[in-house]
Image: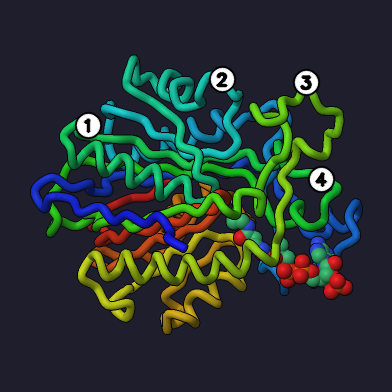
Amino acid sequence: MIFARRTTAPSPERIARLIGLGSYLPPRKVSNADLMSRLDTTDEWIRTRIGIAERRIAGPATATSDLAVEAGLRAMKSAKAEHVDAVVLATATPDHHVPGTAPLVAHRLGLRQVPAFDIGAGCSGFVFATTVAAGLIHAGTAGTVLVIGAEKMSAVIDPADRSTAPIFGDGAGAVVLTTGRADEPGALGPAAWGSDGEHADAIHIPDGGSRRPSHTTGDLKNQYVHMKGNEVFRHAVRRIAQVTQESATAAGWAVQDIDRLIVHQANARISAAVAGKLGIPPERVPSNITHVGNTSAASIPLLLSHSALDGQLKAGQRVLVTSFGAGFTWAATTLLWPAGLQALA
Ligand code: UT7
């Protein structure tokens, strides 16, 4: 079987450079004990099988765009940028099917008529969006781009499904990328990415799209995420390890050179298995899943933001971000951590 895999190779004179980082979590915490009051589950099972103690859940009046605006504002403030040339928003939970969520976010950020569009690549969405944004910069189409990953997963998770409800949470993170040189701090390296639609039904929402419009079906359960957890787990470990290796090789790094591996926060056991497979010591693999759960496309920028604030990301470190999600999709990219970057949360 042939798997689609492409690796971009930016010109060293016009690559994307990280200059701003921000994140936002809705204030309401939902603990495992809260879930135990309505689900047949235990705190111990959720902690040991997934690594989560609590997640943030947005209120009914909050949509994905509201989370995205908060993260976008913080990233632009962090970058000291008043304007950007484009907004790329990764989400699996857009406010509406139509229109895209990014134009609304750009409007609310006061960015006038900049091009703004959504990217849907499941939990890999943020790294896909970053790769597309880096391509815009590389091609000279945009000089500075705001890239956001935002999700209101609670809108598509069945609160009565114990195989998904403990896992997912809401939140948003964002970065600002601008034109730079390959040897500059903050420089993004080449990306490795791919997909395999053979496993499209491993994580999916059966109804509500053009295949089965919601007005033609009666089963509300089919408007929630359905996930084959074991199958996803197995593929996630293999693909994340593989795409991490590909991204490191494309950057001219050995896996041992990676100072910090920023892995999509799907399950603490997935991150540990990937690190073990690659021989990366656990202290080089930061994590925030215990407190935020799996926030899908928001996971990577939230972890970057929290790790920067915790002092786990330091100037000059070789950082590799790597992800896997519905589709299946997978993507990874390298960067040299910039000096003086103040993350805002
Ligand atoms: O972001 C990308 C997308 N998502 C992922 O990457 C998620 C990948 N998958 C996973 O993280 C894991 O597969 C899950 C966390 C979803 C499930 O963990 P698992 O270790 O694969 O559990 P399992 O489905 O194999 O179930 C093991 C046992 C079963 O009981 P028996 O048959 O062994 O008696 C389940 O019924 O655990 C039971 N179980 C639960 N028990 C308490 C399943 N869910 C729960 C629960 N609480 N919430």
Residue 340 visible in the snapshot? no
Circle 4/circle 3 CB separation < 8 Å: no
Query: Label 3 neighbourhood size at 10 Å, few (<14), some (14-19), many (20+)?
Result: few
Q: Amino acid at mark 3?
A: His
Badge 2 or badge 4: first in the primary sequence: 2
Measured in 3D between alpha carbons, the distance from the residue under mark 1 to the one under mark 4, in whole angstroms, is 41 Å
Q: Which residue is rendered at x = 43% and y = 39% of the image?
A: 148
Badge 2 or badge 1: first in the primary sequence: 2
Q: Nearer the viewer, mark 2 or mark 1?
A: 2
Circle 1/circle 3 CB separation < 8 Å: no
User: What secondary structure is marked by label 3?
Assistant: helix
Q: Which residue is rendered at x = 83% and y = 34% of the image?
A: 220
Q: Which residue is rendered at x = 58% and y = 70% of the image?
A: 270
Measured in 3D between alpha carbons, the distance from the residue under mark 4 to the one under mark 3, in whole angstroms, is 22 Å
Residue 215 badge: 3
Q: Amino acid at mark 4?
A: Pro
In the image, residue 115 sits, relative to residue 239, either above or below, namely above
Q: Nearer the viewer, mark 2 or mark 3?
A: 3
Residue 245 badge: none
Residue 142 badge: 1
Q: Amino acid at mark 2?
A: Val
- Residue 185: % across, % down: 19, 57
User: What secondary structure is marked by label 4?
Assistant: loop
Residue closer to the observer: 297 or 220: 220
According to the picture, the residue beneath numbered tag 2 turns out to be 98
According to the picture, the residue beneath numbered tag 4 turns out to be 159
Badge 2 or badge 3: first in the primary sequence: 2
Residue 285 visible in the snapshot? yes
Measured in 3D between alpha carbons, the distance from the residue under mark 2 to the one under mark 3, in whole angstroms, is 16 Å
Q: Nearer the viewer, mark 1 or mark 3?
A: 3
